[in-house]
Amino acid sequence: MTAISVRDLNVWFGSGAARSDAVLDVSFDVAEGEIFGLVGESGSGKSTILRAISGLVPTWSGTMTVAGETLGKRRSQSFYSKVQMVFQDPYASLHPRHTVDRLLSETMRLHGIRDVDDRIVQLLGDVGLGAGFRFRYPHQLSGGQRQRVAIARALASNPAILLLDEPTSALDVSVQAEILNLLSDLQRAHRLTYIMVSHDLGVVGHLCSRIAVMKDGRIVEVLGVSEMRQLQAQDPYTRKLLASSVHSIR
Amino acid sequence: MNQATSLRDWLLTEEPASRRQAAFASWYKGWLRFRGNTLAMVGLYVLALLILAAIFAPLLATHDPFVQDLGNRLMPPGSEEHIFGTDSLGRDIYSRILYGARISIYIVLLVAMVAPLLGLIVGTVAGYAGGWADVVLMRITDIFLAFPRLILALAFVAALGAGIENAVLAISLTAWPPYARIARAETLTIRNSDYIHAIRLQGAGPLRIVTRHIWPLCVSSLVVRVTLDMAGIILTAAGLGFLGLGAQPPSPEWGAMISEGRKFILDSWWVATIPGLAIFSISLAFNLLGDGLRDVLDPKDSAT
Amino acid sequence: MTDQGPLLDVENLWVRFRSRAGMFEAVRGVSFTLGRERLGIVGESGSGKSMTGRALLRLIRPPGFVEADRMSLHGEDILQASETRMRQLRGGRISMIMQDPKFSLNPVMTVGQQMVEALRAHEKVTKAQARTRAIEMLDEVAIREPERVYDLYPHEVSGGMGQRIMIAMMLLPNPEILIADEPTSALDVSVQLQVLDIMDKLVRDRGMGLIFISHDLNLVAKFCDRIVIMYAGRIVETCKASELRQAKHPYTLGLLNSVPDLEHPRERLDVLARDPAWREAPSVSARQ
C-alpha cells in the first residue's frame, strides 16, 4: 500500500518578480510502514516538501495523495489526525507558557479524544518520560525531553504518518541517539510511516530504508540504504555528499 | 514554621503533581524574581500605600474634603490641623489628596482595562489575519496615532461632555493605538513560530490560536507597557482636569486641584505643588513597577 | 620563533556566573597548555567548552567572572592584563572565529572595509597596503575573484564563503593563536570540509596554535593533534588525536558510539548512561 504519493510537486514563495521556486517537479512514493529520507543541504527544498504536505505552505501545484486522501488547498480535521509533524528545534516548537499537560490535553480535545488523563500518562510513558513530567513547563525540560514531548504531541491523535523535519539536528549526539532509538521503537510498535528530512547522511542512513537526495529544489537521485552504505551513487552530487559525510575515525 | 517550609517546597518543586500546583508554582517563582528587584518593590509599596489610602480615605482624612472654611484659606503646610495646608476656599489639602486618590486610581484602572484590551484585539487580529484585515485595521490605528493625544481626548470630551466617565472614555480611545502596534508586532513574530505551526497541524482554528496561544504571549509585554503608560494616563487625566474638561469642581481630582492652585502659585506654592507631588509619586511608582514586571514577564528570561 | 615554552599556559581555570539562584560554575578547574599545535576541545552543550575559549580572550561579561592560578601568553599574564592590553592581544595575537558568519560580520560594511579596519587596528599600515594584503588573504582562503568579493556586503556572500572571509580577516594581523568555536556547525556538510581544510592549511603553514572547539569528535580527530574532552566544566580525558580509538573514559566512548555511522550500521544506537561520578571526578590536566 502506498501511504504517500507525490506527483510533479512544485512549491514557490512570493509572486510575480519576487517569486522564488523552492521545489521543482518532485515526485516520489512512500509505502506504508516505510521510512523515507529526504536529504539535501540548506535551501534544497527538503523541509518545504514536508510543509507543503502538512498544509503549512499553501502555494503549491501538483498532486499529493496522503493516506488515501487527495489533498486540496485545505486540510480536513481527519487529515490532521492521520498525519503529524515533528519540528527541528524543540526549543521553538513548544509554547513557552503552556505546561506539557496543557499542550497534550488541548491536542487531544482538538481530536475529540475522551479519556484525556489516562491517555496523557500513557503517551508520556510511550516516549520515555514519566508521569512526573506532566505538569512541567518547557523551560524546565532539557532539549531531548522537549523533543520527546513534541513527539508525544505528534502521536496524541494516533496518526499513521509522521513527518520528521530534522528532529535531532538541534540536539547533542548522545541525545540524538536516544531520540533516534525512540523513533525507531515507535515506528515498529505502531507500524508508522515516516518521512524524515535531514542534512546528516549518517542519521538518515541509520533510520531510513530509501533516501531521496535533493539539490536546488529537485530530487537528483533516489537510492536504497544499502547502496548508500556501499557508497554506490550514480549522481556526482550524491557522491560528493557521501564523500564529505564519511569521516568517522572508526 | 514547618508548615511554611513545606509550602515553599510545594511551590518550588520541579515536579508539580497537579495543574493547580503548576500554576501556583509559576506565579510564586515570578513573585520571587519580582521581589529580587528592589526598585520594583519600592514602586509596589508606594502603590499599595496609595491604594490603601484611597480605600481608607474616610478614616484617614482629618476634614471633609468639600467643606469650605473661608476663615482659614491658603494656610501654609504644617499649620495647625492642616499638615498640607488649605486651598483658596479653606479646604484641607491633605483630605482632598486622599479622596482625590480614589478618583485618580479609578480613572487609571478603567483606562488600563479598556485601552489595552481594545489594542490587543485589533493588533492580534490584524497581525494574524494579515491581508486586507491587517491593512484596514492598521490604517485606522495610524489615523488615531496621527493626532496628538491630548487634542484628540479634548475633541472627544468636547463631543461627549465633561466628566470623569467621559474623560476615561476619551483617554482610552486615544490610548489604544500603541498597544495595537505592539500586539501586532508580537503577533507577526509569534505566528511564524513552530509552536503555532504545531497547533495548526492539530486542526486548531484561528480564533483558538489567537485567544489561547497568541494572547498569553502578548499580554506580558502589554502589561509592562500599560504600567509604564500609567503615568501618562494619569497626566492626561490631570491635564483634562486642569483644562476643566475632566472631573468637575468641587471634586478633588488631582489635576483639577493643580488647576485651581495655578492662580495662587506665586504666593501659595503648596496649593498646586502638593497634588503635583501626588501625581509624581503615583507615576513614579507605576514606572518602577513596570520595570520590575518587565523582568518577570519576559518569557525569554524565564528559562534561567 | 626561538622560545620553546608553550604559547598559552592555563592552570586551574574557573568560570563562574553569579545568579539569584546561587553560583553557577561553567568551567571548573581546567588546566592545559597550547604549543604550536592543533588542540581540539570537545564536549556537549553545557560542557563549558565555549566558555573556556571565551575566557582565554577575557570575553566573559558580568555576572560571569574568570579565575585561574595561571593564564599566560608567552609568559605574559593575561588574567591581570589591562583592558587596553587585552584589546591589543585580541585579534592581534589571539583571534577567534565564531559559529555563524552571519552574526560576526557587520552587515552595513563591505567585506573589504571590515578586513582593512581589523588590520589597521593592530598594525600601522596605509590603506593601500591594507587593501593589498586583504585581497591577498582572500585569495589564500580560496576565494575566486578576491577583488570583487572585497567590495561585497556580507549578505551577498554564502555561508561557506562568509566563514572563509572570517578566517581571512582573523588571520590578517598574523596572530599566533586561533580559537575556532564551532567554525563550521552552521555550514552545509559539503562546504564544512573545504572550510576546515583551508583553515588547517593556513594554521599549519604559519606555525600557529589552534584551539578547535567542537561537539563533533570525528571532525576534531581529523583536524587536531591533541584532544581534550570536557564534561560538566571539567576535562575528563585528554589524548592524542591518533589515539582516540584507544580512549578509555566511558563518556568519550559513549560519545563515539552514539554517532550513527553510515558505513557501520547498527540496529540500535548506544545510549550514553551518564554517571554522576564523572561530574565530581577531578579535572584531568592537559598540560604538556
Image (tube, rainbow, N blue to C red):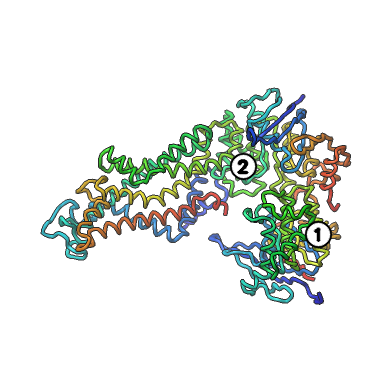
Q: Nearer the viewer, residue C73 or C114?
A: C114
Q: Nearer the viewer, residue C181 or A11?
A: A11
Residue at image position (64%, 64%) is C59
Q: Are marks 2 and 1 on the same chain?
A: no
Locate residue C17: give its quadrant.
bottom right
B3 over C130 or under it: above or below = above
- Compared across the picture, whether C76 is left or right of B61 comes to right
Q: Nearer the viewer, residue A196 or B138?
A: B138
Residue B120 shows in this picture: yes
Locate residue B140: give its quadrant.
top left
Q: Which residue was labeled with disc 1?
A: C200
Report x, y in % for residue C283: 72, 66
- Compared across the picture, whether C35 is left or right of B160 comes to right
Residue at image position (52%, 46%) is B22
Q: Amino acid at mark 2?
A: Ser
State which mark lies toward you, 2 or 1: 1
Q: To which chain does the residue with label 1 belong?
A: C
Badge 2 element? loop
- Compared across the picture, whether A69 is left or right of A204 comes to left
Q: Which residue was labeled with disc 2?
A: A93
Badge 1 element? helix
Q: Amino acid at mark 1?
A: Asp
